[in-house]
Image: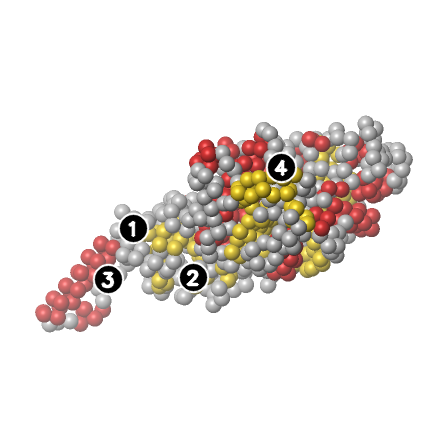
């Protein structure tokens, strides 16, 4: 049995009681109190080790020592009611009665604030009294039995505003070995508020996570070379991107908008279902696919059963209050295979809640049980599937945007189903941005509504705009913390021309890139002129300008791929857009050697210089399709810290592909992001 260290003795007034009768009553009451204490405070709760102290900012934050906060964590796979539970201190100075339901594998954030949010994170309950200076916290269930205890502050640093963080949730909180001082930067010190589990539980390398308005987090799912980090700017790498997305989904309180090329990740599906069941408005915009034979069709079928789960919600009824609202660029019909439907818990007959339709889709007439309505090209005719809704972004409430190169798929994150089930992150190489900016959220929501056809939960197929039907639109300019950001959506704006123009005008010293598919010759020729001073075939002399790059190996020998020109190779065919203007001096470019696909679409311009360090990233490959046909989003981020983090990631891909990075420089200081 755990020693909870009650530390009390007879009250002083008892020493002054001389009457036998009153002495007997007083002693009897004291014995009853001791029995009650021994029976309840000394008895572990049935929830012991199920709910634990997870992280404690007993020192406050770098802004104020009064800004204390702590988190509880549900270690189980079932919800736990904490109604009537008590957070108390050994010395009796803290007494917080708790309420609510703690969801599986989720945290419960308590903070000393009068607001509903703490550094941009929604808090679950206020800390009404300051935490004791020397430690000593107990968590008691509604019957007064011990759930968890921390007799003293075993870790944490007041000087660094570094939290005391649980190393592993299943060891006793009273043990010093159960705790460590956090080394992960956040807005006001070191800690991981709002995150279910610190990366010490896994192989993830999480170095900095910010939550407040005006902050940008960058995540890479493969390893990075942090020797190239500027001071205090080590990149987040080997990160499970799905977990980061789920953390943010769980923080949503009002609405979530999701625009995806593909989805087959059950944990994200479950997270969206949970939020919809709790009253959060969830809209999902998805790309429709053609029915193909073999592996691709199996993936499409898998996506469709997950979409039907979302449409049916927790109660299994299409269109009920807990349903996720769905829309696509082209209609999607339900899977009819009875075995697959049974495997995923769907009604054996899709006609339960769905209606059979015959629709004109592109130039074809198709029939089936309509699962996801699609956009109309003209009255009575829907768009076909020749173009792609290739976005991969999430909007949380009215303040946060998640975007990048990653598809929400097993191959995108884990590589295989077996890896996913084992928690092994070995999928396609990707990058992801997590940005807290209400202004950016409005920009992305406007683009979402344009494709949705309305700003309500009900899409409007007749008003939805995809592909070339989108109106021309200017880029969006905004300031996010210290970063100047430009946002481009295509079609509607020539984003490849914008990248080319930026290279021509602003690139002064170096370009590094990691790209899945690159066929645009104008952009490639602009870099050739920087590299060897000429845009002509096999002409030019080397300049001091640096070019390094990694290409996805799948397209390395395709006649249209930019690497053929860069290597000075003669393409087997040419076109108006790909005239095969070869470089005289091939730059150091390589085909990737990743475990799976190199799925990045980023360029880094002048990193770690006094010029204008810039990262260009998003969902778009550098091709005519991305510019004129597919629905895409691209960001220009002008920020030295962000550019340096991408450089750390690039050199890992470059080294693995066969390149030889020069020795990293001595770390230099870059100004920290603004604190609000």
Q: Residue at x 71, y 50 (%)?
A: 469
Q: CA distance from mark 3 to mark 1?
A: 24 Å
Q: Position of residue 484 (x, y in %)?
A: 70, 57
Q: In front of the other: label 3 or label 2? A: 2
Direction from residue 566 to residue 260 in the image, left or right: left
486 or 641, nearer to the observer: 486
Identify the element where label 1 is drawn.
loop
Which tag is nearer the camera, tag 3 or tag 1? Answer: 1
Residue 365 visible (yes or no): yes
x, y percent for residue 82: 35, 56
The CA span between labels 4 and 2 is 48 Å
| Cα separation between marks 1 and 2 | 22 Å
Q: Which residue is mark 4?
A: 290
Mark 1 or mark 2: name the one nearer the start of the chain: 1
Q: Residues within 10 Å of mark 3 (few under 14, many from 20)?
A: few
Helix, strand or loop at disc 2?
strand
The residue that label 3 is drawn on is 9
Residue that carries the numbered disc 2 in the rendered image:
125
């Amino acid at each position: 049995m755990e020693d909870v260290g009650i530390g009390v003795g007879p009250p002083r007034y008892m020493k002054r009681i001389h009457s036998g009768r009153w002495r007997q009553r007083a002693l009897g009451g004291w014995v009853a109190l001791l029995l009650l204490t021994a029976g309840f405070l000394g008895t572990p709760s049935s929830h012991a080790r199920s709910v634990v102290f997870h992280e404690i900012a007993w020192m406050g934050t770098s802004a104020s020592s009064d800004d204390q906060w702590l988190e509880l964590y549900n270690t189980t796979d079932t919800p736990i009611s904490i109604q009537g539970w008590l957070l108390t201190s050994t010395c009796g100075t803290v007494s917080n009665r708790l309420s609510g339901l703690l969801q599986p594998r989720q945290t419960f954030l308590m903070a000393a604030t009068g607001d509903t949010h703490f550094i941009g994170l929604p808090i679950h309950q206020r800390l009404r009294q300051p935490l004791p200076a020397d430690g000593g916290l107990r968590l008691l269930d509604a019957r007064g039995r011990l759930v968890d205890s921390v007799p003293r502050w075993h870790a944490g640093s007041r000087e660094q505003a570094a939290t005391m963080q649980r190393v592993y949730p299943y060891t006793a909180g009273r043990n010093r070995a159960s705790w460590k001082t956090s080394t992960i930067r956040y807005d006001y010190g070191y800690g991981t508020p709002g995150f279910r589990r610190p990366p010490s539980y896994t192989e993830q390398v999480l170095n900095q996570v910010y939550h407040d308005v005006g902050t940008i987090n960058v995540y890479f799912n493969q390893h990075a070379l942090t020797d190239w980090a500027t001071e205090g700017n080590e990149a987040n790498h080997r990160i499970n991107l799905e977990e980061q997305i789920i953390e943010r989904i769980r923080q949503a309180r009002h609405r979530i908008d999701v625009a995806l090329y593909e989805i087959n990740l059950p944990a994200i599906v479950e997270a969206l279902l949970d939020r919809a069941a709790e009253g959060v408005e969830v809209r999902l915009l998805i790309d429709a696919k053609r029915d193909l034979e073999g592996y691709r069709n199996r993936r499409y079928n898998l996506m469709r059963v997950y979409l039907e789960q979302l449409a049916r919600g927790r109660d299994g009824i299409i269109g009920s209050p807990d349903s996720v609202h769905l829309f696509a660029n082209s209609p999607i019909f339900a899977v009819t295979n009875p075995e697959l439907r049974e495997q995923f818990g769907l009604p054996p007959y899709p006609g339960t809640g769905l209606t059979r339709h015959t629709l004109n889709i592109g130039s074809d007439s198709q029939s089936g049980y309509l699962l996801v309505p699609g956009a109309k090209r003209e009255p009575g005719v829907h768009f076909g599937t020749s173009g792609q809704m290739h976005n991969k972004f999430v909007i949380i409430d009215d303040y946060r945007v998640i975007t990048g190169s990653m598809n929400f798929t097993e191959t995108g994150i884990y590589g295989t189903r077996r890896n996913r089930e084992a928690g092994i992150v070995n999928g396609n190489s990707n990058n992801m941005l997590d940005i807290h900016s209400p202004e950016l959220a409005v920009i992305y929501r406007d683009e979402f509504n344009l494709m949705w056809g309305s700003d309500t939960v009900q899409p409007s197929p007749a008003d939805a705009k995809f592909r070339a039907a989108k109106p021309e639109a200017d880029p969006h300019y905004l300031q996010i913390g210290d970063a100047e950001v430009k946002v481009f959506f295509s079609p509607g704006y020539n984003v490849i021309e914008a990248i080319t123009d930026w290279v021509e005008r602003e690139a002064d010293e170096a370009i590094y890139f990691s790209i899945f598919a690159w066929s645009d010759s104008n952009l490639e020729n602009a870099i050739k002129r920087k590299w060897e001073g000429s845009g002509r075939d096999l002409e030019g002399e080397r300049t001091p300008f640096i070019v390094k790059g990694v290409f996805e190996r799948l397209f390395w020998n395709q006649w249209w791929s930019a690497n053929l020109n860069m290597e000075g190779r003669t393409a087997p065919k040419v076109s108006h857009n790909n005239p095969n203007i070869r470089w005289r001096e091939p730059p150091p470019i390589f085909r990737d050697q990743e475990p799976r696909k190199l799925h990045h679409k980023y360029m880094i311009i002048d990193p770690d210089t006094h010029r204008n360090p810039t990262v260009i990233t998003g969902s778009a490959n550098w091709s005519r399709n991305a510019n004129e046909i597919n629905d895409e989003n691209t960001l220009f981020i002008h920020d030295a810290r962000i550019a340096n983090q991408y450089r750390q990631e690039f050199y890992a891909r470059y080294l693995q592909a066969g390149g030889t990075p020069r020795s990293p420089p001595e770390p230099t200081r870059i100004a920290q992001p603004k604190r609000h």
